[in-house]
Every structure is written in structure tokens, then in C-alpha cells.
Image (cartoon, rainbow, N blue to C red):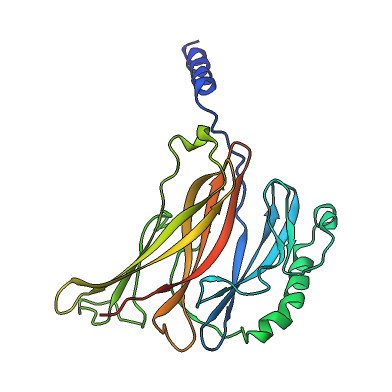
Amino acid sequence: MPRLFLCLASLLMLAAAPLQAREQSDAPDAAVIGFSPDGRYFAWEVYGWDIASGALSAAIHVVDRDTNRQADGFPFGVVAGGDGGPALAGGFAADLDALADEPDMDALRADVRAGAKAKLDALAIGAAGRRLAGVSLTQRSPLDKKTTPLVFVVHPTLPSAIPDQQLVYTLEARPSPEPNDCVNAEPPARAKSVEFDVIGSRTWPELKDVARAATTYSWTMPAGDCAAGMWIADVIAPPGGAGGAVAVLFMTASWNSAVDSAAWHGLFVTLPDE
């Protein structure tokens, strides 16, 4: 009997709490395609099942290092939308109803890649970079906090007691604050600012921060959505070395009272020097 009263009390407390129920879902996946030989363009693919609309999405994105914006004609494919579901982008043609009625992710990805080939070839994209840091979305240990700053060096180094003589970079993403009580505030559509702060430190002959650079990214927030977190999956040096900048691939998660959602983004951040 005491256990029954405890259960009833718990249910009453949940009923009295603000509305915070969310529909949990898997995140979309991402795959790195590569860079242009000069490191100016960085391309990646995003694909997944849009649980809100019950349809597939798959698209290729290309960011331009000169502007930190999508290159002309991108994204290309089927992008996950809001309440309206997936939408066509970049001139890609597909039957959106069929993506829900007869879902075939492999076929959709192949069609998107084939349709984007001429555009990617025009930018000479295909060169591989070097992954410097990051955390896979599937990794839960030892690093499972999305806000943990990443610490990395550009060139390979031996783990030992000898101090590292190259700059050690710390990368941290800091989103602007959310509205007070965002869950019940139903905020309007807005651009949320995210600052990617990079600190260059030298450990020899003494531990010292010697340089700093910040890059601001604008994260589009639909009306009624609240930010749930961020995860930097990859920090990648362009071909030929870092060249003063690296590409960052990261995922943002948001939610409202109906459904969780997530999106992948890419940008270049500057590696400060002495």
C-alpha cells in the first residue's frame, strides 16, 4: 500500500509540472566528402529519417571558407524541414511522397550524389583532409559531454613527459543564452549566435596562452524551438596542412513540445598563431 501511494504522488507531481515531454528520436547521420585542393571548399553529406514527417532526407552541403556560407547551389538534395517535412533544395528533383511511402535510403543517397557530381566536380571537391579532433555521436565514453572543449595539436606528437613544442589549441563553442523558461515561453523564430573560440597555448618553456581567435556562427531557430545542445563531431585540417584554418563539422539539437530535431552544420575557424 505505501508503494501505491508513492506511485500516485509521483503521477500527481508529473501532472503539475510544466509541459516538457519530448518525442525521442535518432539524430541524422553525416559523412565527410572532402575539400577542394586549395582547401577553400569543404563538403559533407547529411542523411536520415525525418520522424516528424515520416520521410527520408539526404543532402550534400558545401561551405566556402571565404564567406563561411553555403556555396552557390548548395545544399543539394532533400533537406529535413520543419512542420512541412522534407523539402527539395539546390535543383534536385524527387517525388517527396515516394520518400515516405517507399523509403529507400541507399537509393536516395545515390541519386543525390549522382545529381551533385557535376557541381562538386566544378569546385574540384574530393581531396581528403586530416581529422585533428572530435567526438563521434555514437561515443559515450570517456567523453560524453557535448559541451566539453576539444584540445588538439595540428601535427602528430608522441605522448610522453616531454613538453609539446607546437601550439596546443583549445576549441570551445558557446551558444548565446536561451529565453528564460524557454520550454513555456514559446520563443519566436530567431537567429541564435554561436561563438567558436580557439585558444592557442604553448607548453614549452612554460604553459602560456599566446593567441586567441573567435568565429561567430548564426544558428537558425524556428518559432517555438529551444536549443537542447551541440556536439562537435569533427575538426579537420584541409589538404596540405591547416593553412591557418580548419573545418568544423558539428550538430545542433533543438526541441519543442512535439518533437526533437537535429541538424548538421559546417564552418571554418581560424587557428591563431603567435
* Residue 21 appears in view: yes
Q: Quadrant of the C terminus?
A: bottom left
In the picture shown, does residue 40 fall above or below 4?
below
209 shown above or below 224: below
Residue 70 image offset from top left, x and y in percent: 59, 70
Percent across and percent down for residue 203 are 20, 75
Count of numbered tags = 0
- Determine the residue positioned at 55% across, 54% down: 220
Q: Is residue 247 left or right of residue 153?
A: right
Q: In the image, is 8 to the left or to the right of 58?
A: left
> Which residue: 48% across, 82% down?
238
Residue 140: in sight, yes or no? Answer: no
Judged left or right of residue 62, residue 246 is left
**Where residue 258 sits in the image (x, y, percent)?**
63, 38
Q: Could you say where residue 64 lies in the image, as x and y percent from the top left?
A: 55, 76
The residue lying at 76 percent from left, 53 percent from top is: 55
Residue 174 drawn above or below residue 76: above
Towards the viewer: 189 or 143: 189
Quick one: which residue is furthest to the top in this view?
A: 1
Q: In this rendered view, identify the residue nearer to me: 108 or 243.
A: 243
Image quadrant of residue 57? bottom right
